Image (cartoon, grey):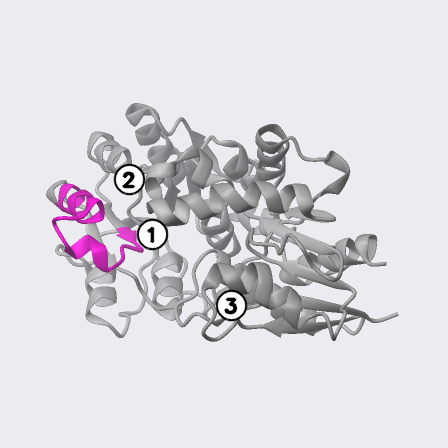
Amino acid sequence: MTLRAAFDARDALHADLRGWGRYAADLLAALRRRDDVEVRPHAGGGRLPELAWEQVGWPARLLGDRPDVLHAPNCFLPLVRPCPGVVTVHDLAFEVHPDDFSPRTGWKYRTFTRRAVASAEAVICVSRATADDVLERYGADPARIHVVPNGPSLPLGPEPAVAEPAPFVPPPSTAAGRRAARGADGERPYLLAIGDLRAKKNLERLADAWRVSGLPHRLVIVGAGGAAQDPGTPEGRLAASLRARGVELPGYLPDAELDRLLRGAAALVHPSLFEGFGLVVLEAMVRGVPVACSDVPSLRETAGGAAVLFDPRDVEDIARGLHDAVDGRDALAAAGRERSTAFSWDRAAAETVAVYRSVAS
């Protein structure tokens, strides 16, 4: 029997997909490739305020259609609905690092995620680490929790023409990308970190560890948004602090340029204090790029023994991780490629449909 699923596709429609938007877009595309589920995306309520559409407008629209299941891919499940509901919880960063969220956004997540978890017929968590967090913080019913990992999302470009200890990418098309690839000192090898300038990303400790390490590599951090240019914002102050240490911040790059930069890195470094899933770790492993990352539950789970782990609060240990990743490049590249084969969006879609079937009446 073909299931009919209503899917909140708003995050998938953003021009610059990040994080949860990539999850919604990639999962939706994989679900549409299947013949056992008919997915009907819903894109929002026009003039209705966001919260009103989520809790009133969307379920009211479904009254005449009556799908078999409704899926909210980012926490905001209608608490009253005409069919069984599935909600995806990516992480509880808004509980652990509330200062990384605006007051209104943090209030919305803290208020409605707990209620969505209690209300849902099934809760999808993108890692066992997030599932454990949801169980501990919200007292969720373990029988309703399902772990469905993400797949890699960044489109994969061609391999570098020559495999070298620290290969370099072809010059990207934008000025920021060219500067990141070339650097001030020509073709010096570089370490790459990917992430916005929030406190949980732990980038100041990374910059300190890089300087302590004595490695000749540059440090490039991609992902800073427009607020990084404003010295009056926390992001702007952090950007200034990182630049003062010699870190290169090319900003947010299009997918093709980020892919080139990632493939040319000597290593991917991910020092985050908290994540729901190690997506950037997975993207590096797919490309055979050595990974050094924080020894926190979600990143340790994603890496699966194929990365160098370090204590993210210990600058000396981060520096040790940088050296180990550079020195162990070949073994880490092979292990990472092998580990990455366990993740795909087709697998995620199959497991998501199984969750749908478990709750559909």
Write down the quadrant of residue 306 in the picture: top right
Find out whether residue 234 is within the magenta segment: yes
Q: Nearer the observer, disc 2 or disc 1?
A: 2
* Bounds of the magenta segment: 221-243
The residue nearer to you, when weighing 96 against 265, is 96
Residue 253 x/y as whole percent: 31, 64
What amino acid is found at the position of numbered circle 3 in the picture? Arg
The residue nearer to you, when weighing 171 against 227, is 227
Find out whether residue 216 is within the magenta segment: no
Q: Nearer the observer, disc 2 or disc 3?
A: 3
Residue 350 x/y as whole percent: 74, 60
Question: Is residue 24 shown above or below 101?
Answer: below
Question: Is residue 161 shown above or below 218?
Answer: below
Q: Secondary structure at mark 2?
A: helix
The residue nearer to you, when weighing 305 against 28, is 28
User: On the image, numbered disc 3 is attached to which residue?
Assistant: 10
Residue 311 x/y as whole percent: 40, 26
Q: Is residue 181 left or right of residue 3?
A: left
User: On the image, numbered disc 2 is attached to which residue?
Assistant: 203
Residue located at (83% from left, 71% from top): 2
The residue nearer to you, when weighing 244 against 224, is 224
Question: Is residue 111 shown above or below 223?
Answer: above
Write down the quadrant of residue 98 in the picture: top left
Neighbour tally class for label 1: few under 14, some 14-19, many 20 plus, Cα within 10 Å: many
Residue 21 x/y as whole percent: 49, 62
Question: Upstream in the sequence, badge 2 or badge 3?
Answer: 3
Q: Can residue 271 be seen?
A: no
User: On the image, numbered disc 1 is attached to which residue?
Assistant: 166
Mark 1 and mark 3: Cα distance apart in space: 39 Å
